[in-house]
Amino acid sequence: MYIISFDIEEWFHIFHPTYENQPGLWDSLSSRVEKNTNWVLDFLNRHQLKATFFCMGWVAEKYPQLIKSIDQEGHEIAAHSYLHNKVKNLTPELFREDTKRVIEILESLTGNKLFTYRAPGFSMDKSTLWAFEILHEFGIENDSSFKSGLHMGFPGRIPKKPFLLKGNGYTIKEFPTRTFNFFGDHIIYSGSGYFRVFPYGFVKRLFQSSVYEMAYFHPRDFDNDIHHYFKNNPVLQLRYRIGTNQSKQKLAQLVNTFKFVTINQALNQVNWEQAPVLDLTNGKHH
């Protein structure tokens, strides 16, 4: 089971002090999200694919027609926060406010109930278990905010396949992003800059060796001009130049080799009765 997803955010929605949590600055920066997301939509249409789109509320508010286009083309709309702050940097009150805002915006644009969420930067860990209770309050039933193979504050490692998050009186289905073990360090390979950097053959072998993958991308991952926008920051320029000239071709190879589905489509492909459980009340696996 291979899932394909896209985080709909601007080129400057990155975790760097120059841009992070500065919506006042964002309004003055050149936008690339519409152009790049439209390329993604055209690509998916050409390959007859549907994907899960985790959309930022800030982007949805600024470009409502973009969200409507994604929805009208039959893709799954999911929430990716309003302001793209890491959950562990927020209080429960701020997280509730941010989550309420993004869900209300996306639901008003699509006319459909939202059921799926992804935290910015995969920033859920043992210190943010309270966030799942808030997600449950807003009707979220599926999440994709964990990296498999890591401890993330828990005694055991995050499972390498879909699992259940069990809270007080509720359950959320979790679709983690997979990692590979590199000398004890667990590294993502199925999306974003990692996908751009690693040779396609290496990624393909890892996909072939597993029965579950969560591929995730950003519109900027396929923009070969994006590095020009990180003015006066050669490190960021290099970071966002590496691999962008080959990323479109690599994505085409990936979707031509493996059969991808949305999270919504994947729900029925998992035997949830046999799935691992992470108890949110005590942080233990069983």
Image: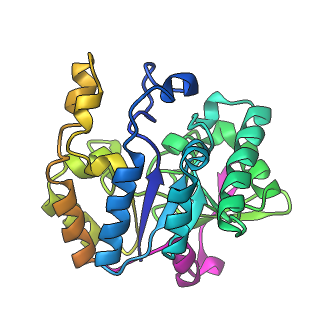
Indicate the quadrant where residue 225 lies: top left
Q: In which quadrant of the rendered image does the C terminus lie?
A: bottom right
Is 267 contained in the magenta span? Answer: yes
Residue 175, above or below 239: below
Which one is in front, 163 or 198? Answer: 198
Q: Residue furthest top?
A: 232
Which one is in front, 50 or 3? Answer: 50
Residue 218 visible to an observer of this rendering = no
Which one is in front, 64 or 213? Answer: 64
Q: Which residue is drawn at 50% across and 57% down?
A: 66
* Left or right position of 137 against 234: right
Please give the range of residues in magenta.
259-286
Residue 97 image position (x, y, % from top left): 77, 39
Q: Residue at x 40, y 39 (%)?
A: 31
Report the number of numbered marks. Answer: 0
* Left or right position of 286 against 171: left
Residue 119 image position (x, y, % from top left): 57, 46
Q: In which quadrant of the rendered image does the N terminus lie?
A: bottom left
Q: Which residue is drawn at 35% across and 76% down?
A: 45
Is 116 contained in the magenta span? Answer: no
Residue 22 image position (x, y, % from top left): 54, 24
Residue 27, above or below 113: above
Q: Residue at x 56, y 28 (%)?
A: 23
- Rendered image coloring scheme: rainbow
Residue 34 visible to an observer of this rendering = yes
Which one is in front, 159 or 86? Answer: 86
Residue 200 image position (x, y, % from top left): 16, 60
Indicate the quadrant where residue 273 lies: bottom right
Q: Residue furthest right?
A: 169
